Each structure stands twice: as structure tokens, then as C-alpha cells.
């Protein structure tokens, strides 16, 4: 990827974090990031190519959580991993990424052949390498609940209940 392509991808990524992907149009995006639709199409091949690049970028942020914020250890305590990940997921500053992730996840389920193809499956596979299915399901459900209701206290209590259950095993 060229430096200009990297620069425009980062600017486009910030734009979609604020505006979402649902109504993404190249003209307003290009104007907002100091480019033109023609340049974006040249650099990314198509609008779908740009969306795929943006989703790859979003997954990189998501995976950085697992590698930087929850460093590997020989025998990590599953309850501690769940609570550390939830702390990151529940943080207000990560909500734009999480809304983008949720949008892309849902779109990949209903438009499996579009630029979203495989996004949901790949993110599940990424996370399953790090945690058991039940904990992943609890965190995903809690995330959806938090984004829908904004009730961080109630949802965090539920995640802590799950962690307590893990510790009692």
C-alpha cells in the first residue's frame, strides 16, 4: 500500500467511525478527507474494495485489543480475560469502533456476497482463538445490549456475574 493510500485509508476510517458505513457515498467521503471519488476508486479499485480495506482496518483494531490489552500468558485466567476485554469494550472511547463492527457484522450476515463477505465468520474465528465460545457469546451479547441501551452498569454487572461463574468452576 502506498503512503497516500495509507493516509486516505486512515482518514476514511476515522470518517466511517463517525458516520458509519450504511449510507457511505464516495463524494461526501472524498470531500471530507481531502480527496476525490476518482482517486479513491483508483487506489482501492472500487467502492467495495474501499469497504473491504476499511473492514480489514477495523479488524486490525479489534485484534490489537487481544494482543496489546490482553497479552498472552502461559495459563491466563479466563475470568480475568473476560473482565479485561469487557473493560475495553465498555469504554466510551471505543463505541465508534464497536458500532462500526456491529454494523459490518450484521451486514455480512444479510449480504454475504458483498464487501462484507466473511466479516462475521472471521471475527468469530479471531476471537475463538483467544477464548471459549460461551465467554465470546456473553461478551458479544453484552456489547449489543450496551450499544442498544447504554446501560453500562447493568451490562457490566452481568459480565462480572459470568466471570464469577468462570472462577467457581
Image: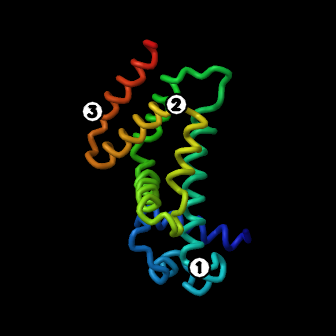
Which badge, 3 or 2, comes first in the chain's sequence? 2
The location of residue 47, given as percent across then percent down, is 54, 77
- Furthest-right residue in view? 2
Q: Are marks 1 and 2 in contact (CB under 8 Å)?
A: no
Q: Provide the residue designation for mark 3.
A: 154
- Furthest-top residue in view? 168
Residue at image x 36%, y 38%? 142
Q: Are marks 1 and 3 in contact (CB under 8 Å)?
A: no
The location of residue 147, given as percent across then percent down, is 33, 48
Which badge, 1 or 2, comes first in the chain's sequence? 1
Residue at image x 55%, y 73%? 48
The location of residue 42, given as percent across then percent down, is 65, 83
Q: Is residue 69 left or right of residue 28?
A: right
Q: Secondary structure at mark 1?
A: loop
- Residue 53 position by quadrant: bottom right
Residue at image x 27%, y 33%? 154
Q: Provide the residue designation for mark 2.
A: 132
- C-alpha gap between disc 1 and disc 3: 43 Å
Q: Provide the residue designation for mark 1.
A: 46
The location of residue 37, given as percent across then percent down, is 55, 84
Which badge, 1 or 3, comes first in the chain's sequence? 1
Amino acid at each position: 500500500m502506498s503512503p497516500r493510500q495509507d493516509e486516505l485509508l486512515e482518514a476514511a476510517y476515522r470518517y466511517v467511525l463517525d458516520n458509519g458505513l450504511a449510507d457511505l457515498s464516495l463524494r461526501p467521503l472524498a470531500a471530507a478527507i481531502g480527496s476525490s471519488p476518482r482517486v479513491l476508486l483508483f487506489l482501492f479499485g472500487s467502492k467495495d474494495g474501499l469497504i473491504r480495506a476499511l473492514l480489514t482496518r477495523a479488524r486490525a483494531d479489534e485484534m490489537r485489543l487481544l494482543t496489546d490489552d490482553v497479552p498472552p500468558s502461559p495459563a491466563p485466567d479466563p475470568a480475568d480475560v473476560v473482565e479485561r476485554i469487557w473493560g475495553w469494550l465498555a469504554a466510551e472511547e471505543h463505541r465508534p469502533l464497536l458500532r462500526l463492527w456491529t454494523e459490518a457484522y450484521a451486514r455480512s450476515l444479510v449480504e454475504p456476497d458483498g464487501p462484507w463477505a466473511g466479516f462475521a465468520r472471521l471475527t468469530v474465528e479471531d476471537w475463538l482463538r483467544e477464548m471459549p465460545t460461551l465467554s465470546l457469546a456473553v461478551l458479544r451479547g453484552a456489547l449489543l445490549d450496551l450499544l442498544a441501551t447504554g446501560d453500562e452498569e447493568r451490562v457490566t454487572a452481568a459480565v462480572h456475574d459470568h466471570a464469577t461463574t468462570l472462577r467457581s468452576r
